Image (cartoon, helix red, strand yellow):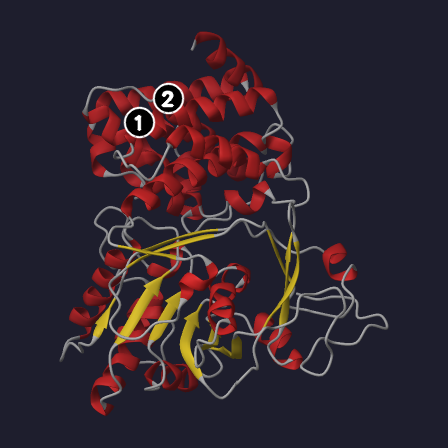
Amino acid sequence: MSADPGVRPRLSDATMPEGVAPLRYVRDRARSGIVHLGLGAFHRAHQAVYTDDAMAVGDAGWGIVGVSLRSPAVRDALVPQDCLYIVEERGAPGGRRLVGSINDALVAPEAPERVIAALADPAVHVATLTVTEKGYHRDPRTNGLLVDAPDVAHDLGGGDPRTIFGFLAAALDRRAARGAGPLTILSCDNLPDNGRLLGGLLDDYLAARGGARPGGWTSPSGMVDRIVPAITADDFARLPVEDRALTVCEPFRQWVIEDRFAGPRPRWEAGGAQIVDDVRPFELAKLRLLNGAHSALAYWGLPLGHAYVHEAVRDPDLLAFVRRQLLAEAAPSLPPSAALDPAAYVEAILRRFDNPALPHRLAQIAMDGSQKLPQRWLATLVERAATGLASPAHLRSVAAWLAFVGDASGGGRPADDPLASRLETIWDGQATPAEIATAIVRSSGVFPAAFGADEALVRALGEALAERLSKGPRAMLRDFLDRS
């Protein structure tokens, strides 16, 4: 996260940029009501903006203490500029705005005690998280905690915390001992029923740790949506000031939160957040339609030579295939909802993707496929198969992911995936596409047990992989479209 400063002043409280919408409130950096774990670009474009909007309508005291769980890069970008940064929306209507809701930025490995103290502060009522799928250390086969994962085992052994569970457990202990009041722990990651998943994993951790289980916390589910691509050197260079925490995103944003808070919360509705009784219809639509489309564009688009989402969605063959996968297979798997028109939602998604002002790299989307595909594709496949319905487009997309893993192994570059080594070992140890598909389904830990138990599904996946490897992506897409 670097930029060429040139002659431009560094963004700060004393250096307000021209052409950027200013703050609509007076900052009070001494008062923070939120701690956020996983201080990345998505948080800065999403939850921090909603909090900024709440503060702009007079909801004071909700500043954020942001925590980077690994790298100091974001802290080093934010702190020298008084934790101010610019959010630039690309596309109609677009524009730039200053965001001041982050009060401080910590780096967990450098200051674990400060992180625990922030989470245990009686003034803090909400902890939010964007730690990506791998930050949950979840066993995809059981949805339980991988207690033998190295960092989890370290935390259970009593060392300075490395995982969200180690930090949260230590903070909850301290809050209970000091009467600090209840804490809402709110996941903002793309995982199904993420609040209950997080709560269950935290309960697993507390049980494995032993001793008293601290109470006084809830973990509502939530659904978030906003496209936030990686920053380029040109993005920095176009600014009127030097802002090393610049965040670029699309104008669209959505946040749907289950109304299950443990205590006070910000007025996030001021920024358009929806507080609802049941998040699941919104969550499933996003996972299976929007996120599912993203993954399909990535694993088909990259071998077709596309680098960005807007390029992939303008490929006529790929667009027709993705539309078929979403409308014929994913949308019918959703529960009926008066609040959602799946066909209209799909077309809105595809319009959002066709935004050249927002270059979103397919390689970024392709990361961590083993953690994403169970929710985005595999659940749909299993559910439809259980009712006797075929899902040929989904099967071919899973085969495209398997080919992506194989291409990485054969090309000597590991896939950017927490299970890369395991997947590539399985791939390299098999002779035929059918053997590769069977071994990965049954040994990788990615596929649900119901998939592996369905011989027809496993066989169909092997056939789809054989077709992908023999024909290549373009011919396979066209043959499928011609036949369907």
| Quadrant for the C terminus in the image | top left
Relative side of 440 to 307, left or right: left
**Marks 1,2: beta carbons within 8 A:** yes
Pick out the residue farthest to the top. Answer: 483
The residue at 56%/19% (across/down) is 317
Up/down of 82 relative to 448, above or below: below
* Residue to which mark 1 is pinned: 332
Callout 1: SS: helix
Label placed on residue 328: 2
Q: Which amino acid does label 1 sit on?
A: Pro
Relative side of 330 to 319, left or right: left
The answer for how far apart the CA atoms under marks 1 and 2 are is 7 Å
Within 10 Å of disc 2 (Cα), the crowding (few <14, some 14-19, many 20+) is some
Q: Which quarter of the picture shows residue 474?
A: top right
**Residue 408 percent coordinates (x, y):** 53, 39
Q: Is residue 365 visible?
A: yes
The residue at 25%/35% (across/down) is 335
**Residue 197 percent coordinates (x, y):** 25, 56
Q: What residue type is labelled 2?
A: Ala
